[in-house]
Amino acid sequence: MKVELNDFAALLAAAIWADGEYAEAEATAVEEIADAFELDVTELKSAVEAEIEKIKDFDEEAIRNYVNEAASGVAREDAPAVFEAILQIVIVDNVFTRDEAENLLFAADALDIDTEEVLLLIADLVRSEPDLEVQFN
Protein backbone atom coordinates (compact mmCIF):
# COMPACT_ATOMS: atom_id res chain seq x y z
CA MET A 1 0.00 0.00 0.00
CA LYS A 2 1.30 3.42 -0.96
CA VAL A 3 -0.46 5.59 1.59
CA GLU A 4 1.25 7.29 4.48
CA LEU A 5 0.07 6.15 7.89
CA ASN A 6 -0.87 9.71 8.89
CA ASP A 7 -2.92 10.26 5.73
CA PHE A 8 -4.74 6.96 6.29
CA ALA A 9 -5.29 7.83 9.97
CA ALA A 10 -6.60 11.26 8.98
CA LEU A 11 -9.18 9.79 6.62
CA LEU A 12 -10.30 7.27 9.22
CA ALA A 13 -10.44 9.97 11.90
CA ALA A 14 -12.63 12.19 9.73
CA ALA A 15 -15.03 9.29 9.18
CA ILE A 16 -15.06 8.44 12.88
CA TRP A 17 -15.54 12.00 14.07
CA ALA A 18 -18.43 12.72 11.70
CA ASP A 19 -20.85 11.83 14.50
CA GLY A 20 -18.79 13.59 17.19
CA GLU A 21 -17.68 10.54 19.15
CA TYR A 22 -15.07 7.79 19.06
CA ALA A 23 -17.00 4.73 20.24
CA GLU A 24 -15.61 1.35 21.25
CA ALA A 25 -16.98 -0.23 18.07
CA GLU A 26 -15.00 2.28 15.99
CA ALA A 27 -11.83 1.54 17.98
CA THR A 28 -12.33 -2.16 17.30
CA ALA A 29 -12.89 -1.41 13.61
CA VAL A 30 -9.60 0.51 13.50
CA GLU A 31 -7.86 -2.56 14.93
CA GLU A 32 -9.45 -4.78 12.27
CA ILE A 33 -8.48 -2.33 9.54
CA ALA A 34 -4.89 -2.29 10.81
CA ASP A 35 -4.82 -6.09 10.61
CA ALA A 36 -6.35 -6.10 7.12
CA PHE A 37 -3.79 -3.57 5.87
CA GLU A 38 -0.95 -5.33 7.72
CA LEU A 39 -0.22 -2.24 9.82
CA ASP A 40 0.85 -2.11 13.43
CA VAL A 41 -2.40 -1.92 15.41
CA THR A 42 -1.03 0.28 18.18
CA GLU A 43 0.58 2.65 15.71
CA LEU A 44 -2.58 3.09 13.64
CA LYS A 45 -4.81 3.51 16.71
CA SER A 46 -2.45 6.13 18.15
CA ALA A 47 -2.33 7.98 14.84
CA VAL A 48 -6.13 7.93 14.51
CA GLU A 49 -6.58 9.18 18.06
CA ALA A 50 -4.07 11.99 17.46
CA GLU A 51 -5.91 13.00 14.29
CA ILE A 52 -9.25 13.00 16.11
CA GLU A 53 -7.80 15.37 18.70
CA LYS A 54 -6.58 17.59 15.87
CA ILE A 55 -9.98 17.86 14.14
CA LYS A 56 -12.35 17.96 17.13
CA ASP A 57 -13.16 21.63 16.67
CA PHE A 58 -12.97 21.85 12.86
CA ASP A 59 -15.93 23.25 11.00
CA GLU A 60 -17.26 21.59 7.83
CA GLU A 61 -14.98 23.54 5.50
CA ALA A 62 -11.90 22.73 7.58
CA ILE A 63 -12.84 19.02 7.58
CA ARG A 64 -13.27 19.04 3.81
CA ASN A 65 -9.85 20.66 3.35
CA TYR A 66 -8.37 18.16 5.81
CA VAL A 67 -9.89 15.18 3.94
CA ASN A 68 -8.76 16.54 0.57
CA GLU A 69 -5.21 16.98 1.85
CA ALA A 70 -5.10 13.47 3.34
CA ALA A 71 -6.64 11.93 0.21
CA SER A 72 -3.95 13.52 -1.95
CA GLY A 73 -1.47 11.23 -0.19
CA VAL A 74 -3.27 8.06 -1.34
CA ALA A 75 -2.05 6.35 -4.51
CA ARG A 76 -4.79 5.80 -7.11
CA GLU A 77 -4.45 2.01 -6.90
CA ASP A 78 -4.93 2.11 -3.11
CA ALA A 79 -7.96 4.41 -3.14
CA PRO A 80 -10.64 1.68 -3.38
CA ALA A 81 -9.22 -0.24 -0.41
CA VAL A 82 -8.89 2.96 1.63
CA PHE A 83 -12.46 3.90 0.74
CA GLU A 84 -13.71 0.47 1.83
CA ALA A 85 -11.98 0.99 5.19
CA ILE A 86 -13.74 4.36 5.53
CA LEU A 87 -17.03 2.67 4.63
CA GLN A 88 -16.47 0.06 7.35
CA ILE A 89 -15.87 2.79 9.93
CA VAL A 90 -19.05 4.61 8.89
CA ILE A 91 -21.35 1.60 9.27
CA VAL A 92 -19.71 -0.07 12.27
CA ASP A 93 -22.69 1.02 14.40
CA ASN A 94 -25.10 -0.71 11.96
CA VAL A 95 -26.74 2.60 11.09
CA PHE A 96 -26.29 4.38 7.76
CA THR A 97 -27.55 7.97 7.69
CA ARG A 98 -27.91 10.72 5.13
CA ASP A 99 -25.00 12.63 6.71
CA GLU A 100 -22.81 9.54 6.53
CA ALA A 101 -23.76 9.07 2.88
CA GLU A 102 -22.79 12.69 2.22
CA ASN A 103 -19.45 12.18 3.98
CA LEU A 104 -18.78 9.01 2.00
CA LEU A 105 -19.49 10.74 -1.29
CA PHE A 106 -17.15 13.55 -0.32
CA ALA A 107 -14.39 11.07 0.66
CA ALA A 108 -14.93 9.17 -2.59
CA ASP A 109 -14.61 12.38 -4.58
CA ALA A 110 -11.43 13.32 -2.69
CA LEU A 111 -10.03 9.84 -3.43
CA ASP A 112 -11.11 10.12 -7.09
CA ILE A 113 -13.42 7.11 -6.92
CA ASP A 114 -16.24 6.99 -9.45
CA THR A 115 -19.77 7.47 -8.10
CA GLU A 116 -20.82 4.25 -9.82
CA GLU A 117 -18.20 2.30 -7.90
CA VAL A 118 -19.32 3.93 -4.65
CA LEU A 119 -22.92 2.94 -5.32
CA LEU A 120 -21.92 -0.65 -6.04
CA LEU A 121 -19.81 -0.84 -2.88
CA ILE A 122 -22.65 0.53 -0.77
CA ALA A 123 -25.20 -1.79 -2.41
CA ASP A 124 -22.92 -4.75 -1.72
CA LEU A 125 -22.51 -3.62 1.88
CA VAL A 126 -26.26 -3.26 2.43
CA ARG A 127 -26.80 -6.71 0.95
CA SER A 128 -24.13 -8.31 3.14
CA GLU A 129 -25.11 -6.54 6.39
CA PRO A 130 -28.70 -7.66 7.15
CA ASP A 131 -28.78 -5.74 10.45
CA LEU A 132 -27.83 -2.44 8.83
CA GLU A 133 -30.46 0.23 9.40
CA VAL A 134 -30.74 2.86 6.70
CA GLN A 135 -32.06 6.21 7.95
CA PHE A 136 -33.33 8.63 5.34
CA ASN A 137 -33.61 11.70 7.55
Image (cartoon, rainbow, N blue to C red):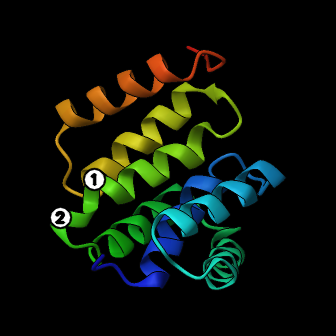
Where is residue 44 drawn, in percent x and y? 60, 78
78 above or below 121?
below
In the figure, is residue 10 to the left or right of 135?
left
Q: Is residue 137 visible?
A: no
Q: Amino acid at mark 2?
A: Glu
Name the residue tied to disc 1: 80
Residue located at (74% from left, 60% from top): 27
Dividing the picture into quarters, in which one does residue 66 lie?
Answer: bottom left
In the figure, is residue 102 to the left or right of 58?
left
Q: Quadrant of the C terminus?
A: top right
Dividing the picture into quarters, in which one does residue 15 lie?
Answer: bottom right
Q: Quadrant of the N terminus?
A: bottom left
44 above or below 129?
below
Residue located at (40% from left, 48% from top): 84
Q: Is residue 82 visible?
A: yes
Residue located at (61% from left, 59% from top): 32
Marker count (numbered): 2
Residue located at (71% from left, 53% from top): 26
The secondary element bearing badge 1 is classed as helix
Name the residue tied to disc 2: 77
Where is residue 128 drawn, in percent x and y? 49, 22
How many other residues sit within 10 Å of disc 1, few (<14), some (14-19) or many (≥20)? many
Q: Amino acid at mark 1?
A: Pro
Where is residue 60 drawn, in percent x and y? 52, 55
Where is residue 89 drawn, in percent x and y? 58, 49
Q: Residue furthest right?
A: 24
Measure the C-alpha gap from mark 2 to mark 1: 7 Å
The secondary element bearing badge 2 is classed as helix
